[in-house]
Image (cartoon, rainbow, N blue to C red):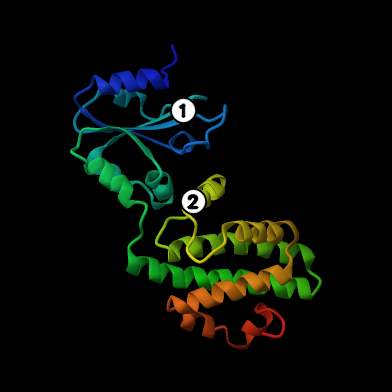
C-alpha cells in the first residue's frame, strides 16, 4: 500500500516524538504548484518514531524526509532558499522550528559581503569572456558565457540583498513578491531573457553598468578596479 501525504500528516500529528512538519518546494509557495508537483515534506523529531522507516520515500506524490531537530543545521546550504520559503504545518518546539526556517531567508551581512565580492568577480569574468568571444566571432562560446554570467549575476544580486538566490522556477515568483531594491523587476527579467536568448552584448554592457554602480556603492570597488583596462570592453560604448 502506498504511503501518502495524508498518511504522513496523520501519523505525525499522532506521534509525540514528532515536533514539527514543514513543506518545501512548489506546495510551500502559493500559486507555484502544478498538477505534477509532489509534496516535499519534512518530519522533524525529538526521539524515536515509527515514521523513520519511511525516511527517503520518493513517490510521484510524496518526498519524505525524517530528521532530528538537532540535525536541521546540517542541511546543505543549497537548500537554504527552500527552507526560507517553506510552509510550517506543525510546530511543537515553542517556535524554535519556525524561527530557524525564517532565519534562512536572511544571510549574515559579513559573510554575504565576502561572498558578493567573489561572485562579482565571477560575474565580471563570464561577462568579459562573452563580450570578447562574440567580438572575435566565437558566437557559441560567447552565448554560453553569457548564460553563465546570468547565473552569477542572480547569485550576486540576491547575496547583496542578504537573501539566498531562488531556484530558477521560483525566480519570477520571488521577485513578484519581494523585488530587489533598486531594480525594476520587469526590465531586469526582460534583460535576462534577451541575454539568454541572444547573448546581446549591448544589453550585457548596459546591465553591467548598472551592476557596477550598485556594487561600487556597496563597497566592492576594489574587485572591479582589479579588472583595470578590461572594464572598457565591459561598459557601454562611450562611457
- Image height of 82 relative to 189, above or below: above
Q: Front-most of 73 and 192?
A: 192
Q: Residues within 10 Å of mark 2 (few under 14, many from 20)?
A: many
Residue 237 picture location, percent across and down: 72, 82
Residue on which the image places disc 2: 166
Q: Front-most of 200 and 131?
A: 200
Q: Residues within 10 Å of mark 1 (few under 14, many from 20)?
A: some
Residue on which the image places disc 1: 58
- Image height of 238 relative to 90, above or below: below
Residue 125 picture location, percent across and down: 59, 73
Residue 85 picture location, percent across and down: 41, 44
Quadrant that contains the N terminus: top left
Q: Front-most of 239 and 53?
A: 239
Quadrant that contains the C terminus: bottom right
Left/right placement of residue 115 relative to residue 18 reads: right
Q: Quadrant of residue 52?
A: top left
Left/right placement of residue 205 relative to residue 62 reads: right
Identify the residue at horizontal 46%, vertical 27% (top origin): 58
Kindly report the distance in space between the C-alpha atoms of the residues bearing marks 2 and 1: 23 Å
Q: Earlier in the sequence, mark 2 or mark 1?
A: 1
Kindly check if marks 2 and 1 are in contact, taking CB atoms under 8 A apart as contact. no
Instruction: Give the SS element for disc 2.
Output: loop
Whether residue 61 is visible here, answered yes or no, is: yes
Instruction: Give the SS element for disc 1.
Output: loop
Amino acid at each position: 500500500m502506498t504511503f501518502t501525504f495524508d498518511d504522513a500528516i496523520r501519523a505525525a500529528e499522532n506521534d509525540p516524538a514528532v515536533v514539527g512538519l514543514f513543506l518545501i518546494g512548489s506546495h510551500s509557495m502559493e500559486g507555484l504548484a502544478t498538477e505534477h508537483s509532489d509534496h516535499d515534506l519534512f518530519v522533524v523529531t525529538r526521539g524515536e518514531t515509527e515514521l523513520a522507516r519511511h525516511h527517503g520515500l520518493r513517490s510521484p506524490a510524496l518526498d519524505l524526509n525524517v530528521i532530528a531537530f538537532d540535525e536541521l543545521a546540517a542541511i546543505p546550504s543549497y537548500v537554504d532558499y527552500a527552507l526560507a520559503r517553506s510552509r510550517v504545518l506543525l510546530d511543537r518546539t515553542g517556535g524554535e522550528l519556525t524561527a530557524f526556517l525564517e532565519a534562512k531567508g536572511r544571510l549574515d551581512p559579513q559573510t554575504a559581503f565576502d561572498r558578493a565580492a567573489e561572485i562579482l568577480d565571477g560575474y565580471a569574468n563570464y561577462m568579459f569572456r562573452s563580450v570578447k568571444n562574440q567580438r572575435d566571432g566565437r558566437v557559441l562560446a560567447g552565448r554560453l558565457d553569457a548564460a553563465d554570467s546570468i547565473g552569477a549575476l542572480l547569485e550576486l544580486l540576491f547575496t547583496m540583498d542578504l537573501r539566498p538566490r531562488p531556484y530558477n522556477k521560483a525566480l519570477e515568483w520571488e521577485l513578484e513578491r519581494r523585488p530587489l531594491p533598486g531594480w525594476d523587476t520587469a526590465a531586469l527579467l526582460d534583460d535576462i531573457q534577451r541575454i539568454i536568448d541572444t547573448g546581446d552584448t549591448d544589453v550585457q554592457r548596459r546591465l553591467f553598468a548598472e551592476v557596477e554602480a550598485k556594487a561600487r556603492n556597496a563597497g566592492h570597488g576594489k574587485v572591479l578596479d582589479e579588472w583595470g583596462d578590461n572594464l572598457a570592453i565591459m561598459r557601454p560604448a562611450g562611457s
